Amino acid sequence: MKINEAIVHRIDKKRQGTAIITLRKDVLPKDEVLISLVEKSCETYGSNPNRGVGIFQPNGVVYPFSTLLENYLKSGLEFTKFTHDAMNLLEKQINSEPFATGGYVIFIDYVDSADKHFFMVVILKLKGGVGISEVELKLSANWNLDVEHLHEAARISVQNWTAQNGNYISFVRNASTNKSFTQYFKEFIGCTQFIESKIQTTELVKAINSFCRDNNYSLEQARIIKTKAFEYFEEQRNETKPISLVALSMRLNNDNPKEFSDFLESNKIEIGDGFEPNKDSYKHLKRIGGKNVEISISFDRALLGKEVKYNKEEKKLTFYKLPTSLIEELDGEMQS
């Protein structure tokens, strides 16, 4: 990981109170303490299942954070100045939520180990602890940033944003945080959350296919994984319940319930919870098919390699067991 710039500011606010911001004047030194903080924040972020995705609101006047960020990344706006302006935006938004409270706001510009460029905004709280002096062995109360529990956080894929590729913003919240509090943070970032079921389902199906390929699953192993996913989607759709990535990951592998969730995070695949599965998008987990103007073919995935065999080199598909109705129609056609 390479940290380009990082800084921390403080925003104090009690419930029903007015926010007061304290701004740091210079960037944080890129020492081991900062590296540990950023790495732990990214780790906690990646393991948090309470995730939403979206893109920037198109109106940069009403939602100026994206304009400020673009000016920093492309037009040479000084990092400290950018974060000071952003904190003024955050102050305004958090004051719109009477019960929201503040914390330590960390802005991080970094490149991960896969050479992907990200920008993160994280709000952390303090947690109490007990310290000890090495010489006198005296106990004392101390306070530390609670990096294991992100109060609010947003991560922007700079490369995907530049390319306008999919949902390039993701955000998470502390599971114990009231959902209404998250709204002010989304407004601050200027994120419009997309829960378009067809697009989200299609992306999730692509991720499942990639998951099977990356794990070098056999044809039968992949079929089992895809059948489990199909059955989960069917259950959620029939009960009109939204998709939970945590529940899906547990369904795919009981022995390692976080395997699929970890795969999504390690590959930075931004898919949010809360959408209803679209059957037109996930039916391909159960069936294989394709068509053009002249021909249409569809069959159950379980038949591949058995009653249906595919020659990859010659691009030929052979059926060894045809439906009785099709046989009768073909026999009748050949007699005419």
Image: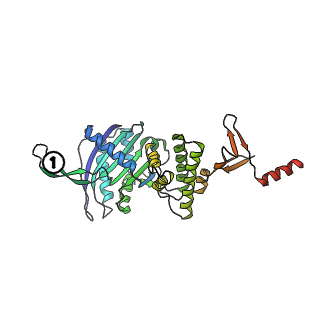
Q: Is residue 241 left or right of residue 71?
A: right
**View extreme (front): residue:** 255
Residues 112 and 98: in front is: 112
Residue 105 can be seen in this image: yes
User: Residue 176: x percent and y percent?
Assistant: 34, 60
Q: Residue at x 68, y 50 (%)?
A: 299
- Give left or right: position of 333 versus 216: right
Judge the density around disc 1: few (<14), some (14-19), many (≥20) Cα neighbours within 10 Å.
Answer: few
Residue 106 image offset from top left, x and y in percent: 30, 47
Mark 1 belongs to which amino acid? Ile
Q: How many marks?
A: 1
Residue indicated by mark 1: 132
Outermost residue toward the top in this view: 313
Q: Is residue 30 left or right of residue 247?
A: left
Q: Secondary structure at mark 1?
A: strand
Q: Residue furthest left?
A: 136
The residue under the point 82% across, 49% down is 330
Q: Position of residue 324 (x, y in %)?
A: 78, 54
Q: How is the image coloured?
A: rainbow
Residue located at (25% from left, 51% from top): 10
Quadrant of the rendering where the N terminus is positioned:
top left
- Residue 66 appears anywhere in the view: no
Measured as percent of width and height from the top left, residue 276 is found at 53, 59
Quarter of the image where one finds residue 158: top left
Residue 176 in the figure: left or right of residue 200: left
Residue extending furthest right? Answer: 336
